[in-house]
Image (spheres, helix red, strand yellow):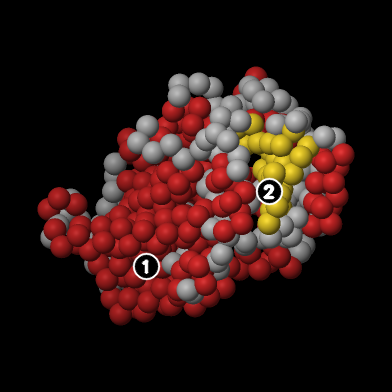
Amino acid sequence: MTGQTLETPVRAGGGDVPSWKSRLPGHRVRVGAVALVAGVAYAVLGLVKLATFRATTFDLVIVDQAVRNYAALRPPYIPVRGMFGGRGMDYVQLADHFSPIYAVLAPFYWIHDGPGTLVVAQAALFAAAIPFVWLFTRRVLGTWPAYLVCVAYTLSWPVAQAVAFDVHEAMFVPVLTAIMIERYHAGRMLPAFLAMAALLLVKEDMGLMVIGAGACLIALGDRWRGVLSALLGLGAVLLVRGLTISVFGGDAKDYWAYGHLGDDLPGALLGILRDPFAAVLLAFSEEAKVDTLLLMVWPTLLLCLLSPLSLVALPHVLVRMLADRPQWWQADFHYSAFTVVILLCAGVDGLARLLRLIRRSGDRSLKLAWAAGACAVALTLVPRFALDQLYHPGFYTEPKAAAAEAVAKVPSGVTVEAANSVGPALTSRTTVLLWGATPHGAPWVVADTSRWEFPFGSPEQQVAAVGELEAQGYVKVFERDGYVVLRRD
C-alpha cells in the first residue's frame, strides 16, 4: 500500500496523530454525546417493542434463557429452542449457535433480571462502536468527516434492523470489528488481535470473518500476521462446526443451507471449485440478493469496493448469498449488522486511496463532501427501515391491554407454551416454550388466534390448535381480542 497504510497512524494531511488523551476534551464529549444519543434511540426502539408485545420468543427468549442461566452459574440451557427442535429441556445454547460471549452479559442480570436488560445491553454495544469509528475516520480523513461518518453509522440501516429485531449475537460484532480495525491502524497490535480473537466467541461462522481479516492483512503486505490470522479463522470454523457443536449436543447440519452445493463443507467447497463461475452467478441469482448487496455498499457511495478492508467482510457476505435460505439474503433482518462497520471503514479507506490515486490526498473539501454524502445516504434510507418508527406517535401507543391481561393470568414459576409475541413478557418469571402446532404438554398455554404467529401458517391453524388443546382436556381461563389462556386440569 503506497503512502499511508493501516499500520501507520497518520493524519489526513500527514504527521503523527496525538493520543486520545492529548486531544481537545471537547471531542471526547461530542463523540460521547453521539454515542449516548444513539444508544438511547436504539434502546427506546427495542424497549417499546418489548412493552407493546412486538418482541418475539424467537429469538429474545432464547437469548434471555441462556443469559439467565449463565447469571445463575448454570449451563446456558435454552428449553424454548430445545423443545422446538425436539432436543429436550436441557438443550444448551452452545449446541444451537456457538456464542459463549453471551456469558459477559450475565452480571447485568444480577442488577435486573429480564429481557429488557438484553435490549439495553445490545443498544449500548452497537453505540460503543462509534468512538472507534470516529478515531479511525479522523486519522484518515479529518475531524469533521469523522463526525459525519459516525452519524452515518448511527443511522445505518443494518444497525436499525438489528436493534428492531429482538437481540442477537450480532450486537458484539460492530464494536469488536471497530476496535480491530482502528487499533491496528493506530499500530496497537495487541488490542487489535484480541478483538479479532473475541470474534470467534460470537458465533460459529465468525472464523470466516477472521479468514477475511487475514486476506486483508496479506493484501496490505502484513503477510505473516495475515497467514496466521487466516489459519486461525479456518481452524476455528472446522473445530466449531466439526466438533464443538456436536460435543454440546447439537448438529452442525441444523444450519447447513448449502445442499445445492454439497452435503457438507468439503463437498460444497469442491462444488464451488469445480464451477466457480456458477458460484459467482449464484451470489447474484435473486433480486433480493442484488438489492441487499447494493444496500450494503451504497452507503459508502461504492468506495468501500476500493479498499482491502472489504476483504474482511467478503467471506461472511458470500456465505449469506450462497445459502438457500431467503431470510439470510434479505435486508429485513440483522445479518448485515455483522459487516456494517467493516464496509463503512472500507469506504473511508477507499476514499483515501482514490484521493491519493488522483493526487488530491490533501483536499479537505472532497473528504468532507464524501462524508456528507455518506451521511445523506444513511438519512435517506431511514424511512425505509426500522428507525422510521421512532418519530411516529402510533409506535408508542399501540394498544395491547388484552395481551397484558392474558399474561397476568399465568402464575409465576410454571412452564408455559406461549405465542411467539407473548413469550418475552413471561420469560422473567416462567419457563417459556414456543406455542406451536405440536403441543409439549405444558400446564399453561397462552395462544393468539387473531393474527399470524410463527411457527403457524395462518390464524386459522392457530384457532384449530386451540380447539385441539381443549379436546385434550385444557380449559379456557381467559379469552379476549384473540388472546386465549388455557390451563390443563
Q: Which mark is residue 478?
A: 2
**Is residue 3 left or right of 161 when viewed as pictured?**
left
Query: In the picture shown, does residue 320 fall above or below 302?
Result: above
> The residue tagged with tag 1: helix, strand or loop?
helix
Position of 349 relative to 257 (above/below): below
Q: Residue at x 26, y 61 (%)?
A: 33
* Relative to 476, residue 253 above or below: above
Q: Nearer the viewer, mark 2 or mark 1?
A: 2
Report the residue at 70% width, 31% height from top: 443
Q: Is residue 2 visible?
A: no
User: Observer-nearest residue: 12 or 146?
Assistant: 146
C-alpha distance separating marks 2 and 1: 47 Å
Residue found at x 71% / y 65%: 288
- Occupied quadrant, residue 369: bottom left
Q: Amino acid at mark 1?
A: Val
Q: Position of residue 482 (x, y in %)?
A: 72, 57
Secondary structure under tag 2 reads strand
**Residue 214 placed where, x, y %?**
50, 41
Q: Nearer the viewer, residue 165 or 136?
A: 165
- Figure quadrant of the N terminus: bottom left
In the picture, the quarter occupied by the C terminus is top right
Residue 102 shows up from this direction: yes
